[in-house]
Structure formats: C-alpha cells, structure tokens
Image (cartoon, helix red, strand yellow):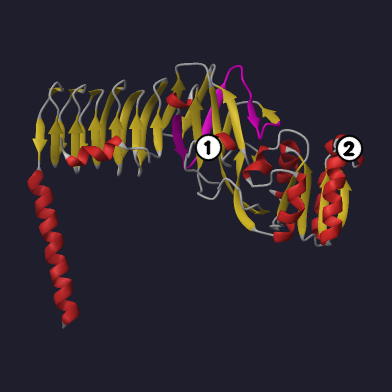
Amino acid sequence: MNVFIYDAITEKYKRKTRRFEEKINNLGLQGKIIYLQSIKNYKEAVEQEIRNGAKTIIILGNNQTVNNIINILANISENIPVFIVPIGENNSIAESMGIKNEKEAAFILSARRMENIKIAKANHLFFINNCQINSKLSEIKIDNSYKVFSLKETTYKIINLVDKEVYSKDIKTSPQDNKLELIIKNKWKDMSLFPITKEVEIKSKEERVLLDDSIKIETPVNISISEKVIPFIVGKERFF
Amino acid sequence: MFKKDQKFENFTEAETIIGESVLVKGNFESNGNLIINGSLEGEIKTRGAVLVGEKSKINANISAQEMMVKGNVVGNLSVSDYLAIGESAKILGDIECSQISIERGAEINGQVSINGQKNKKEKNTETETVEKIEENSSL
C-alpha cells in the first residue's frame, strides 16, 4: 500500500497538489493519506502505517518535511522505499533526486527506479542533504586528525547529496560512496574540498549548525555517515 | 619540457583541494590526489599525486607518489616516483625521489637524493616475475 504524507504546505499549494493527485489516480497509484497538520503525533502515525505494511512512503512537501520523515525512518529497522513530491520552495533534495516538479513526479513514482542512499548523522539527528555553518568563530576537525580554518568569512558546507551548484562544477561526490565532503568557498575559483571518511567535529561559540536547510542545532556537533540505508525512488535526471 | 609535467597541467581529478584562503593544521592522510593552493602545517601522506600551487605556504613533510611544486615548502619531500619542481618553487628541506625535473629559477635548500636505479630495479623484478609466470603457465 502507498502511504502519502501531506505536509501543511500542501494547503498553500492546492492546485499543484491536486494536479499530482489527478496523475496518481490516472496511474492507479492511490493509497492512504496522512495529513501532518491534523495529527499531533505524526511519528506514531507513520510508524503505525509501516507496521500495517506500507509499501512506499510518498512525501509531499519540502526539505523540512523530508528531514522530519527521515528522522522517523532512521530509527525503524524496515527499509521502506521513499519518494518525494516537491511542493513549494526549498526543494533541493527532490531536485538532487531528479524530481523537478509535481507534474513529473507521478510518472517517476510509477517507474520505481530505486537507489539506496546512506543518510548522515549529526549528534542524535539525521540528515540526507547537507549541513552548514558560518565559518566565523567555528572550528572544524576532520577524521580526528586535522583542523581546517577559513581565513575569510564564508560557509562550511558538509554534503551528502549533490546539489545543483556542486553538480554543475563537476565535483565527483555521491551519497553512495560512504563518505561526506566538506566544501568551503567564497568564490568557486578559491574553493576547498575535503573528503570525510570518518567524522567531522564542529565547534562554534556563536553559530549553530543548519541541517537540510531546516533545523538548527547547537554545537559541538559530530557528523558522520550513518549505517542507515533508505531506498529512494529517483528520476533519470538525478545528480548522482 | 618533460612529458610527465603535462599530467599536472590538467590536474583536476583531485580528491582534496585546499583553496587559497584556507589553512589546514595537522596530519593529513589520503589515497587520492591533492591540490594545495592555501596554507598547511603538519604532515601530508598520500598514495596519489600532490600539486603545490604558486601561492601555497607549506610547513610540513610531504610523502607522495608523484608531486609538482610551484610554491613555498618548508619540510622534507619523499616522492616514490616523479617530482617536478617549477620555476617559482622555494623548498627548504631534503628531497628524496626516483625521478626529478627542475626548472630554471627554482630555489632548493637541502639535500637532494634521486634514486632512479630503485625504479629500474623494481621494473626488472616485475619483468622477471611476469616471465616466470609465463614459463609456468606454458608448462
């Protein structure tokens, strides 16, 4: 059974959501719908649907919605396939997976092209895309062996999924290579790139770490690739 | 110029890039290629190649398979294969490598040991091994 998880944002983008629903109906891919805004404990609701034998989890929302659901699935032993329908703004995760908009989404879902992706961990929370922190007064220690300092104020970005910008620069990285990458750049001409095979430790007196463009957490933060693998249904034009 | 230097002209397949505005402190170990345009203090060990750019400032011992130096290095260099030293290079430390090329203008202050024989000897050993395998397989 398909389980559709609707973020509250779908209320704002009713026309787009309806367009996706029409396509889903035409393809015969209907399933159960969970409206996040109408449930107090959505974690329990998602877990219940998985216990009931959910075949695919389909998330309608943005990066923040995906991050919330990933943090539920990360603590469940079953590896249920996940699909993202980008609704609204801040949808770089869906974009990396080759899902540009709700129009294409239904067809990509029906094709069921699957890729296993290891998600990353920042202290007790999980993320799939990236995490970042302003370099000001921040200390970065990589693989417990060396420290990196930026002499100009910039952003440290630790990536798991390749975003559009990184993809366009032909930087070879993948969410399937068992490592993360640290990118530091003011301008691309002055870009720095470090592979992270074990762990990054971030400390900062002022700044917080932003996970998947949605949640901010206090430092110190230890970041690494987790053992959790989630199968994602992806499009042909994915960035990895 | 040496043909081998052309390899470094299109040296973009690097696993690690240290940009101009970045300082790295500590022990850096890798299996891949490394481009350094910034500053580094500590030690570098890689099984790949290292390109030290013109604006780089390095205070570290470096161990690599291949290397091209165009910037400032204070430390010893141990290169198992080929070392190219550009005209803008300033090296304060001892050098050990199998093959070397040095452009006019480069500054080196230290002992240079070029052990080209070692490579030849290794290649001869490899050839002998191949011959032995071939002999065995024909039996």
> Disc 2 designates what residue?
A11
Q: Is residue A1 visible?
A: no
Q: Secondary structure at mark 2?
A: helix
The structure residue drawn at horizontal position 45% and vertical position 27%, both measured from the top left corner, is A191
Name the chain letter of the residue that bears numbered label 1: A
The structure residue drawn at horizontal position 42% and vertical position 20%, both measured from the top left corner, is B21
Amino acid type at mark 1: Ser
Q: Which residues are magenta?
A: A192-214
Q: Secondary structure at mark 1?
A: helix
The structure residue drawn at horizontal position 68% and vertical position 46%, both measured from the top left corner, is A99
**Quadrant position of the N terminus of chain A in the picture:** bottom right
Amino acid type at mark 2: Glu
Determine the residue located farthest toward the right in the rendered image: A38
Which one is nearer the viewer's eye here, A34 or A24? A24
Q: Residue A193 is drawn in which quadrant?
A: top left
Say above or below: B29 vs B124.
Answer: above
Say above or below: A236 vs B107.
Answer: below
> Disc 1 designates what residue?
A168
Residue A204 is covered by the magenta coloring: yes
In the picture, measured across the screen, residue A7 lies left or right of residue A223, that is right
Residue B86 percent coordinates (x, y)? 20, 27
Compare marks 1 and 2 and give the one earlier in the sequence. 2
